């Protein structure tokens, strides 16, 4: 049998599972984006920067080598040694990362190139073979240096492509998160609305019928048809209990009506008998036979009335017992309502758990937005370095132009540096565009999660409204219990009056027996009989008043 608790747990478990699946997908996707961002920040960008630095170092080394061959100034040779030391530091930085065989080959080639410059250019120049040194510079050093710089430029291009590829993957992930987020939000919304409508309808429809029936019972309307429901859970049990209570009340009121009518009839007969006995008492002095006959009739009527009153008392007792059963059933209904309220509180706790999961997903996406802001800052720093490098290249070109023929080598180096700076600027522009797209997609994901968060809050409000409906049912059941308590009190009063009537009837029987016992005491017996008849008449009127009071109570109920 599917209980109300089982239905509620299954309904909200479906929403929880769907929300958890979305949260898991979101976590895995964001984690993958974080890994790619980390790869860009901690490996690809630093390698790109160091590649550019090494290429620039080779270009500067080639430039000072030309200057030394042209002018023979040891300052350029010392500057070459400093650039060599700087190049070795750059190589150390590169080796901290995962270097490819191609990069390692370029590093080895650059080291061999420096050794060749020192042995075949500087050493030859110092030995006086300036033409040989100049030839080695033009035929060996320059082509090798350009090959090294071209290789580094190709590596830089490959790294830029990797960065762009990772950026594209991150945009794809962000787009997937957005689409899945929208789909999950719509699914949770639709499923939540369907579950809320179905659950509320399955609970509120029979509950409204029960409340209406309880209000009718409170007003005394017992003739309504039986409430029908297909539910087999606690609501179904509650409906069955209400139907049982209505039937028991209807049966009890019918019994009370029958007993009341019977008491009214008997009280009228008792009054009539009392009047006849009193009339017979007045005629005792003249008619002995009439007195004897009247005494016998009185004794017979008293015996019959005594039996009738005994039956009446037993029927009243049955009604009292039935009212106690109804009170017990009302208490059972109240307990079931309390259980329903507890189930609703547990449902509210489950919705709070869903709320926490959605909030955690929102915090993760906001953390991704912070990471992309950090990338933007780093890209700005690289942009500034590229601009400064471009400015330095421009200044070097100006100085080379001033130097004329002697500055031609500087002009070539300045032009190469300017090209490198422009390439870095273009790469940074692409990276900035990618990061901006990531930030925009992240903001859309945050907005989608905020919307899902609002939907969960709406589901919580609907469950709380259902809980308030259970509280209204509880108040209606309490009111029915109070009415039953008042009716039981009235029945006990009627039972006490019945005992008084029984005592009066026993006195009548005793008087009748004494009247029939001896003619000698006819006068005394007649006086006592007259007094007893007055008491019987008063008791009969009291019984009639009690019966009328009971009829007034019964008329407040409609049983047909």
Image (cartoon, helix red, strand yellow):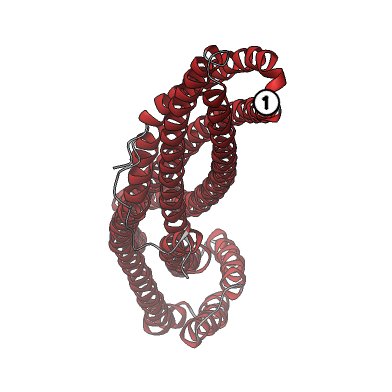
Q: Nearer the viewer, residue 431 or 196?
A: 196
Residue 509 is left or right of residue 225, and the answer is right
Q: Nearer the viewer, residue 471 or 41?
A: 471
Secondary structure found at label 1: helix
Percent position (x, y) of residue 130?
Answer: 47, 77
* Residue at (50, 64) in percent of width and height: 38
Residue 443 is left or right of residue 484, and the answer is left
Q: Is residue 286 above or below residue 211?
A: above
Write down the residue under mark 1: 507
Q: Quadrant of the C terminus?
A: top left
Q: Nearer the viewer, residue 56 or 341?
A: 341
Q: Nearer the viewer, residue 398 or 338?
A: 338
Question: Crowding near pointer 1: few (<14 within 10 Å), some, many (20+)?
Answer: some
Where on the picture, by quarter, is residue 14?
bottom left
Q: Is residue 198 above or below residue 172?
A: above
Percent position (x, y) of residue 292?
Answer: 58, 28
Percent position (x, y) of residue 13?
Answer: 46, 63
Percent position (x, y) of residue 443?
Answer: 34, 48
- Counting every numbered tag in the picture gives 1
Q: Is residue 405 visible?
A: no
Residue 348 is left or right of residue 85, and the answer is left
Q: Is residue 178 visible?
A: yes
* Residue at (32, 52) in percent of width and height: 226
């Amino acid at each position: 049998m599917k209980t109300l608790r089982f239905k509620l747990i299954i309904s909200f478990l479906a929403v929880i599972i769907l929300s958890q699946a979305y949260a898991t997908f979101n976590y895995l996707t964001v984690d993958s984006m974080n890994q790619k961002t980390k790869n860009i920040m901690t490996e690809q960008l630093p390698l790109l920067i160091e590649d550019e630095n090494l290429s620039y170092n080779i270009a500067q080394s080639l430039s000072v080598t030309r200057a030394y061959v042209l002018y023979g100034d040891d300052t350029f040779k010392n500057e070459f040694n400093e650039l060599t030391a700087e190049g070795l530091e750059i190589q150390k930085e590169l080796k901290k990362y995962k270097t490819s065989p191609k990069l390692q080959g370029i590093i080895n080639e650059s080291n061999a190139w420096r050794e060749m410059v020192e042995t075949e250019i500087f050493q030859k120049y110092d030995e006086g073979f300036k033409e040989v040194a100049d030839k080695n510079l033009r035929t060996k050093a320059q082509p090798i240096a350009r090959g090294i710089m071209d290789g580094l430029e190709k590596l830089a291009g490959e790294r830029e492509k990797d960065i762009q590829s990772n950026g594209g993957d991150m945009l794809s992930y962000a787009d997937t998160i957005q689409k899945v987020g929208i789909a999950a939000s719509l699914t949770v919304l639709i499923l939540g609305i369907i579950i809320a409508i179905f659950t509320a309808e399955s609970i509120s429809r029979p509950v409204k019928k029960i409340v209406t029936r309880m209000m009718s019972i409170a007003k005394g309307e017992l003739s309504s048809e039986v409430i029908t429901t297909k539910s087999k859970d606690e609501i179904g049990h509650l409906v069955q209990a209400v139907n049982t209570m209505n039937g028991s009340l209807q049966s009890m009121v019918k019994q009370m009506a029958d007993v009341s009518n019977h008491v009214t009839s008997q009280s009228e007969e008792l009054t009539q008998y009392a009047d006849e006995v009193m009339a017979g008492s007045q005629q005792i002095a003249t008619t002995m036979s009439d007195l004897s006959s009247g005494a016998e009739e009185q004794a017979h009527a008293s015996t019959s009335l005594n039996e009738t009153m005994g039956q009446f008392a037993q029927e009243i007792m049955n009604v009292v017992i039935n009212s106690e059963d109804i009170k017990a059933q009302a208490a059972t209904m109240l307990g079931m309502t309390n259980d329903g309220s507890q189930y609703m509180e547990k449902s509210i706790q489950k919705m709070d758990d869903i709320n926490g999961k959605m909030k955690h997903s929102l915090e993760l996406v906001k953390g991704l937005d912070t990471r992309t802001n950090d990338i933007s800052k780093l890209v700005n720093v690289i942009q500034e370095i590229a601009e400064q490098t471009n400015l330095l290249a421009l200044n070097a070109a100006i100085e080379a132009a001033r130097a004329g023929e002697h500055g031609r080598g500087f002009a070539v180096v300045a032009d190469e540096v300017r090209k490198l700076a422009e390439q870095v600027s273009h790469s940074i522009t692409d990276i900035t565009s990618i990061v901006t797209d990531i930030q925009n997609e992240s903001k859309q994901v945050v907005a989608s999660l905020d919307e899902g968060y609002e939907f969960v809050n709406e589901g919580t409000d609907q469950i709380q409204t259902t809980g308030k409906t259970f509280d209204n049912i509880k108040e209606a059941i309490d009111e029915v219990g109070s009415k039953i308590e008042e009716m039981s009190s009235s029945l006990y009063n009627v039972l006490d009056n019945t005992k008084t009537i029984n005592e009066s009837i026993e006195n009548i029987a005793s008087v009748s027996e004494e009247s029939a016992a001896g003619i000698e005491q006819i006068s005394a017996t007649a006086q006592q009989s007259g007094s007893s008849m007055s008491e019987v008449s008063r008791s009969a009127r009291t019984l009639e008043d009690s019966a009328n009071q009971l009829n007034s109570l019964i008329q407040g109920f409609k049983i047909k």
